[in-house]
Image: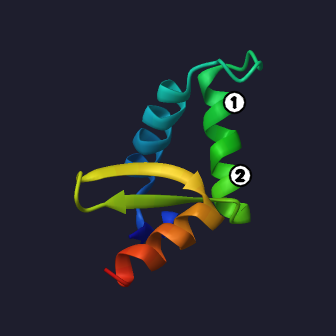
Amino acid sequence: MIIPYQELNAETLNHLIADFVSREGTDNGFDQDQESRIQQVIGLLKSGEVSIVFDPQTESVNIIPAKEAQHYESMINHS
């Protein structure tokens, strides 16, 4: 299920994004501090390039490319 970021309170959204960027690490070749990466993810959410998804089977939340999120959502709705 896609969770619109606007429906999350600011504190929850910040914790979710901070957890996400800490899992992603710095293996992407960029040496940015955590706050810069958080701001980058917020920008991607606002532009619609990434989405927040909740997986009810694993009860986990992740941030993935929006196209993947839409595909994932359509698979769940057809199950």
Give the class, few, some or many, for how many residues have Cα within 10 Å of label 2's Cα (few <14, many ≥20).
Answer: few
Q: Earlier in the sequence, mark 2 or mark 1?
A: 1
Give the quarter of the figure containing the C terminus.
Answer: bottom left
Task: Tell me if residue 53 comes above or below residue 16 in the rendering.
Answer: below
Q: Look at 50% across and 63% down and name the residue there.
A: 5
Task: Tell me if residue 21 comes above or below residue 29 in the rendering.
Answer: below
* Residue 11 as seen in the image, left or right of residue 66: left
Residue to which mark 2 is pinned: 43
Q: Label 1 sits on what residue type?
A: Ser
Q: Which mark is residue 10?
A: none
Q: Look at 48% across and 36% down and name the residue there.
A: 20
* Residue 26 as seen in the image, left or right of residue 62: right
Give the quarter of the figure containing the N terminus.
Answer: bottom left
Residue sticking out furthest to the bottom: 78
Q: Look at 70% across and 53% down and name the residue there.
A: 44
Q: Where does residue 28 sit, x and y in percent of width and height? A: 71, 24
Q: Where does residue 18 sit, x and y in percent of width and height? A: 48, 34
Q: Look at 51% across and 50% down and name the residue there.
A: 63
Tell me the element at label 1.
helix
* Gap in angstroms between the C-alphas marked 2 and 1: 11 Å
User: How was this image coloured?
Assistant: rainbow
Which picture quadrant has residue 25? top right
Question: Is 33 or 63 nearer to us in this picture?
Answer: 63
The number of numbered discs placed on residues in the rendered structure image is 2
Q: Label 2 sits on what residue type?
A: Gly
Tell me the element at label 2.
helix
Residue to which mark 1 is pinned: 36
Task: Tell me if residue 33 comes above or below residue 12 in the rendering.
Answer: above
